[in-house]
């Protein structure tokens, strides 16, 4: 049946208000307008960030909202003026746009397109209307891409075509978790061969940092997590040792400094917590250690730490989606995956039907999963 130009009814997961659980609803998805694309989502991962949307700790979200930002799908129809993709193309929705025109897009050293939600909200399409309705109410978009819906509409600056041979139930992880962690090591830290790294938080993002450190040739990769069940996979993916802070009387930064002599060359925070961020910074080598912040901190929080840590030459950097200019980089990462340059599949511990999304979040919160992929 040709659906182009028509409203499509499908299943989506809606958060009606902060603190309310996800509810699976039938939604109406309007056709794409000019410079917009409607996509049939085939698979979507659950990222720690979607959990922040449920609790209201992700900035600038408006409710009711359809979250989800780690998806892969097939273009169903396109609006006027779209040139980069066509119906039938396999695509990844981009949670960080690459408009190609703003001052950030024109600079080589940043991926923070000025169309990012941190700069202007992405709760409605650029024309300030929504393509989603449910029970007569307008539902907001999330990061413009809302992948927890079987059909979703997004601007053409937030979608990229990928190799038709790639399985979409794996490729969805390029939309956020894998790219974020892997790029934090390769692009943001630019880990040097032979170096020592510490990775705080061994979820999907932290384990992708571990893979990036390994790919960059780090000789020592120390995983840090309070859930020791994460250690098996961390070691499989490249961690040389793992530490549980709860097994030590001393603060973990002191343990790391002692273990390494003078601290680590690179420390990554992939938890989203200020205490672990301070610990990661304090575990860096005097004079040259680099701490990369990847986890999203609690909304409205302020960071306090001993400024002498920086005065003496350590660096604190943030990494947004691994520093990748997503439109340029995701197709290349997909090609590297097809060439088996990294083990993305190892991150997927569960593949569930979309209807089990709540079970998926329960597994994530109970620490029983790395990445859960939901399939429509
Ligand atoms: P996750 O919940 O799968 O992993 C978090 C891990 O941290 C778990 O293994 C926890 O056991 C562990 N942990 C919790 N507390 C501590 C602690 N005190 N010390 C050590 N480990 C601890 O989440 P994820 O891997 O999907 O995401 C991790 C963070 O990265 C989260 O804050 C998410 O919002 C953020 C993120 N940032 C970007 C970005 O562009 N910067 C992109 C995607 C996700
Ligand atoms: Zn831009
Ligand atoms: Zn994410």
Image (cartoon, rainbow, N blue to C red):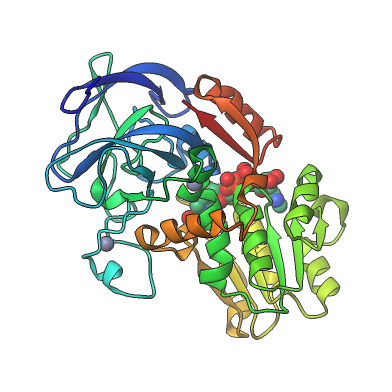
Instruction: Reply above or below: 61 against 320.
Output: above
Between 8 and 136, the residue placed more toward the observer is 8
| In this view, 326 is above or below 127 | below
- Residue 175 at least partly seen: yes
Q: Residue at x 79, y 73 (%)?
A: 257
**As drawn, is 292 to the left or to the right of 145?**
right
Residue 237 percent location from the top left of the image = 72, 56
Residue name at image x 75 percent, y 76 percent: 263
Q: Is residue 296 visible?
A: no
Q: Quadrant of residue 152?
A: top left
Instruction: Tell me: 170 left or right of 109.
Output: right
Q: Residue 29 at what x, y percent from top left? A: 26, 25
| Residue lying farthest to the top in this orientation | 135
Where is ligand 2, by quadrant? bottom left
On the picture, is 306 further left or further right than 176? right
Asked whether 306 or 347 is in front, the reply is 347
Residue at the (45%, 19%) spot, across then down: 23
Residue that appears at 70% across and 37% down: 367
Q: Position of residue 5 (x, y in %)?
A: 15, 27
């Amino acid at each position: 049946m040709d659906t182009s130009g028509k409203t499509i009814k499908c299943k989506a997961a809606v958060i009606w208000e902060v603190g309310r659980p996800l509810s699976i609803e039938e939604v109406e998805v309007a056709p794409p307008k000019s410079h917009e694309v409607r996509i049939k989502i085939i698979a979507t991962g659950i990222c720690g960030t979607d959990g922040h949307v449920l609790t209201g700790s992700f900035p600038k979200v408006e409710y009711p909202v359809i979250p989800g930002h780690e998806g892969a799908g097939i273009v169903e129809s396109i609006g006027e003026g779209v040139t980069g993709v066509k119906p039938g193309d396999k695509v990844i929705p981009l949670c960080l746009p690459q408009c190609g025109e703003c001052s950030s897009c024109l600079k080589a050293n940043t991926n923070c397109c000025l169309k990012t939600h941190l700069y202007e909200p992405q709760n409605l399409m650029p024309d300030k209307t929504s393509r989603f309705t449910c029970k007569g109410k307008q539902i907001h978009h999330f990061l413009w891409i809302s992948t927890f819906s079987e059909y979703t509409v997004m601007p053409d600056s937030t979608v990229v075509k990928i190799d038709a041979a790639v399985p979409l139930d794996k490729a969805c992880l390029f939309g956020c978790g894998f790219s974020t962690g892997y790029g934090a090591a390769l692009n943001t830290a630019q880990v040097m061969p032979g170096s020592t790294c510490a990775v705080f938080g061994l979820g999907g993002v932290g384990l992708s940092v571990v893979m990036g450190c390994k790919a960059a040739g780090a000789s020592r990769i120390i995983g840090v997590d309070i859930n020791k069940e994460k250690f098996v996979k961390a070691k499989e993916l490249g961690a040389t040792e793992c530490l549980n802070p709860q097994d030590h009387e001393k603060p973990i930064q002191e343990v790391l400094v002692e273990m390494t002599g003078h601290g680590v060359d690179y420390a990554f925070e992939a938890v989203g917590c200020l205490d672990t961020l301070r610990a990661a910074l304090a575990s860096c080598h005097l004079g040259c250690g680099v701490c990369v912040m990847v986890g999203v901190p609690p909304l409205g929080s302020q960071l306090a730490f001993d400024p002498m840590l920086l005065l003496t030459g350590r660096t604190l950097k943030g990494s947004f989606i691994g520093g990748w200019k997503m439109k340029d980089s995701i197709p290349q990462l997909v090609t590297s995956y097809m060439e088996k340059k990294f083990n993305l599949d190892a991150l997927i511990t569960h593949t569930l039907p979309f209807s089990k999304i709540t079970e998926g979040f329960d597994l994530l919160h109970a620490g029983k999963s790395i990445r859960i992929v939901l399939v429509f």
